[in-house]
Image (cartoon, rainbow, N blue to C red):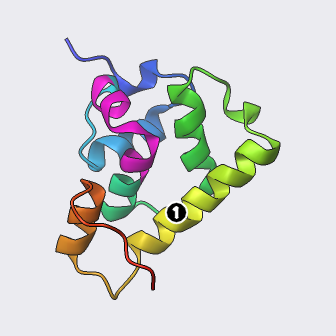
């Protein structure tokens, strides 16, 4: 039986609902996709970008409290968040290009 998303530390009902809306129905799916892919799916599904929600996913998947993210780790996550947000809203890239990048078929280009 699949485990509810709220069984993962830091994930409450609101974040779980956004994850389900993005096609991530349970904790096992979230663990297999990882925080970056899950957050990208949330953005594609229409979730509003929010840095705290992004790093809450990372911390939760590591079993850490959400407020444990600090310093260099937080700065590195912020760079990844900004890249995911920009990628999700890049009007120059087609849906096919984004999907191919997500599964690792295309190599990113230097723009």
At 17% from the left and 72% from the top, the residue drawn is: 96
For the point 28% across and 48% down, the residue is 21
Residue that extends furthest to the right in the rendered view of this protein: 71
Q: Which residue is more in the foreground, 13 or 74?
A: 74
The x, y position of residue 103, in whole percent, is: 24, 53
- Asked whether, in this view, residue 49 is left or right of residue 97, the answer is right
Quick check: is 94 in the magenta stretch? no
Where 29 sits versus 2, above or below?
below
Judging depth in this view, the residue of 76 and 29 nearest the camera is 76
Numbered disc 1: secondary structure? loop
Quarter in which the C terminus is drawn? bottom left
Which residue is found at the position 28% from the left and 39% from the top?
Answer: 24
Residue bounds of the magenta highlight? 28-39
From this viewpoint, is residue 104 visible? yes
Q: Which residue has dot 1 on it?
A: 49
Name the one closer to the observer, 67 or 95.
95
Residue ID at (23%, 17%): 2
Q: In terms of image quadrants, where is residue 25? A: top left
Q: Main secondary structure of the magenta part?
A: helix
């Amino acid at each position: 039986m699949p485990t509810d998303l709220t069984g993962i530390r830091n994930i409450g009902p609101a974040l779980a609902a956004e994850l389900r809306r993005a096609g991530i129905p349970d904790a096992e799916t979230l663990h297999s996709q990882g925080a970056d892919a899950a957050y990208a799916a949330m953005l594609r599904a229409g979730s509003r970008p929010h840095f705290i929600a992004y790093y809450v996913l990372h911390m939760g998947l590591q079993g850490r409290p959400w407020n444990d993210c600090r310093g260099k780790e937080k700065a590195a996550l912020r760079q990844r968040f900004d890249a995911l947000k920009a990628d999700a809203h890049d009007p120059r890239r087609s849906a096919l290009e984004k999907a191919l990048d997500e599964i690792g078929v295309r190599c990113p280009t230097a723009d």
